[in-house]
Image: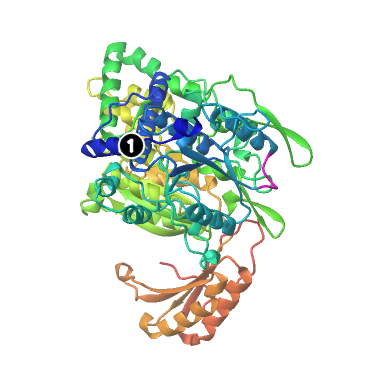
Amino acid sequence: SLSDAYAVNTSRWLDKRTEATKHIGEEEDKQWPLLDALLQSGPGNANTAKKARHALRQIDRMLDVFEPGQLAFSFNGGKDSTVLMHLIKEACSLHPTHAFTHVQPIWFQNPAHEFPALKEYVEEVAREHFTYEQGLKTVTDENLNRLWTMHITTPRDLIEAMRHLSSSTGLRCIIMGSRRTDPGCRDLQQIELMDLAPIFLSSTLSRMKLETRLNMRKLDASVSAHPAQGDLKEPSLLRFSPILEWSYRDIWDFIRAVEVPYCRLYDEGFSSIGTMIDTVRNPALLAKNIEPTLAPGLVPAWQGAEAILGKRRYQEMETASIMAYKKLGVDLYDARYYGGVHGNSMQMSGGRVGQGVKQSYYPAWFLTDESRESGSRVKISDGAQVFSAEIRGTSSVDTAAILIVGDETVSGLVSERDSHLLGDALSSIGIAVKQVMKIENDIDVIAFMVRRLSPVHKYLFIAGGTGAGHDDVTMAAVAKAFGAGLQRNPQLLQLILHNVPAHHLTELHLKMADFPFGSEIIGQVPDAASIKESEWKDVLRRWPVIKKNNCFIFSNRPGVVESNLATILPELHSSQLFVTTIYLNLEMSWIVREVAEVHGRFEANSIAVDAYTLHQDHLNLPDYTAIRVEGKNWSAHQLAVSAMLDQLEEDWIVSIEEAHATTDNIRPDAPTRNPDNQNLQY
């Protein structure tokens, strides 16, 4: 009968649950075919396979903890939810108590503005994956579709939907396709197997207490991240994101390796899909932007190295490098993987943009700079479209952070001046440095800081930890932070092979040619054959900058940052910034109240007023107090400067310095009140 076919054998499930408590946290022996397909697709997908295994084990554990019918997952037809759906289905295929039909798919749909192509794809997936295996039919003899659709147009609707699911259904957990780079997901915590151990082992807990324990472990706070919705209570549902640490590259590696069907919009220049009113083709996928990165015409790294070192010796070095990176949790991709990503077999799509001009776009998986994934999303503001890349938040636009890496700098054995050079150069073009940190050569510490700082600031600059030393792990750390592997650049490798004596050459030297997958080289790479041995030190001082997403990575050799500033500054973009500095022959503590008052008056206009003491003992000059007024609004800036000058006695003022960074050629008139009519030189 129908009830017999779908009745859950509670006694059998409880027996399995009791038995599983003995093995929680242990390695599983399950052989998921999906993992085999990933591993067989090529060594370049080893990192993605590792993440897929972890996600499958996490989902498998959730199936152990929850009863059939208590789990759901969000499916909206996007690339992330497509990967999530296949992972859940794979985990259910080898689970003793859960079939895929026991996990409820939910589509949080915008009823008026979904792309027709997306609707078509969701309907296709529903027909193939969201019908009952036993062939239940509707009255019109169609397979019964079990996809729930909930209409969502505002954040309030989403919260209300969650509340409804929590109060009116038996669901206790929704599995989400959220990733760390998604809005509101930067601070989410990853659930681990042992996190569930106290819940899983508490067989004496009542169901109510068990659910209370689970509800305390909310993983996704994004739905409550809207201050305007503070009057709504957060739904009592556990939200679990098994692909939280996956990168954009991981998602597409998975889809392409196991040949998962996906929405055709991703082949037409869209890197992220929302609704028709907030989604456009990503300019980064235009043919004119992608084609310069394709088919560089270089001999693959391994071929050039084998020709110089011999096949056996290079393979031994490469194996040593791969094993060393694996200990750090990072993979070294080979040339076959790079060729697969940038293959020329995929056809470009045409899309009409601008004034009816047809331009060609590459598919979404050609995008190697993950930070530009959001280039497809726009924000509607006062009837105008604003690209999401331009609205990263007031805390991230035109700000930067600097990481100085090296045990020798942290301990004080070596002094560094790179942060001062960078800070001065960045401020001159309107980018404010908000954080400068010195950290040790620890791959996990570096990766953690990159993961924390990269989404917050427009740019992140990293200096140090890029040499041939065994403890130089910055490149591997950045790759780990973005969930990518490392690739070996043929030009840099040839530069090393031609200039490091063969009897000194080791696999440690070769890693200077490795950088995070999808990175760009900023600067000119010298021709290897033209470098004389006496010039090698000069080459190291001019080693090119590596750019991964919004991170610029420098060597920590003396002179590298300084010599590359002229190269990287054109790569940076900022809005105008107006800066006025007033120098006083006055003790700073005498005017702190006045500075605080002016700052408070203009803070709402994003004008900052600060004071600091300028020590000049080394120049045998007296100390001065400097008052710095900066902001992006010229009128507000001028009013703040005038207000500050009104608080000062005229004979206190030594000079006034203007240092405006503007995006156009029109420089506003400077204030005229300057008693000495000169700038302070120091």
Is residue 524 visible in the rendered image? The answer is: no
- Res. 107 image quadrant: top right
Badge 1, how many Cα within 10 Å: few under 14, some, many 20+?
A: some
Indicate the quadrant containing the C terminus: top left, top right, bottom left or bottom right: bottom left
| Residue 113 part of the magenta segment | yes
At a point 24% along the width and 53% down the height, the residue shown is: 410
Dominant SS type (magenta):
loop
Residue 639: image x %, image y %? 59, 77
Q: Residue furthest front?
A: 1
Q: Residue furthest right?
A: 356
At a point 32% along the width and 34% down the height, the residue shown is: 12
Between 64 and 563, the residue placed more toward the observer is 64
The count of marks equals 1
At a point 51% along the width and 38% down the height, the residue shown is: 81
Residue at the spot of label 1: 13
Q: Which residues are magenta?
A: 111-115
- Left or right of residue 609, residue 538 in this image: left
Above or below, 511 relative to 437: above
Give the structural element (helix, strand or loop) at label 1: helix
Between 308 and 462, the residue placed more toward the observer is 462
Residue 33: image x %, image y %? 39, 22
Residue 540: image x %, image y %? 35, 36
Above or below, 676 relative to 437: below
Residue 339: image x %, image y %? 49, 21
- Left or right of residue 431, residue 327 in this image: left
Q: How is the image coloured?
A: rainbow
Is residue 45 visible in the rendered image? The answer is: yes
Amino acid carrying label 1: it is Trp
| Residue 367 part of the magenta segment | no
Above or below, 628 relative to 172: below
- Res. 347 image quadrant: top right
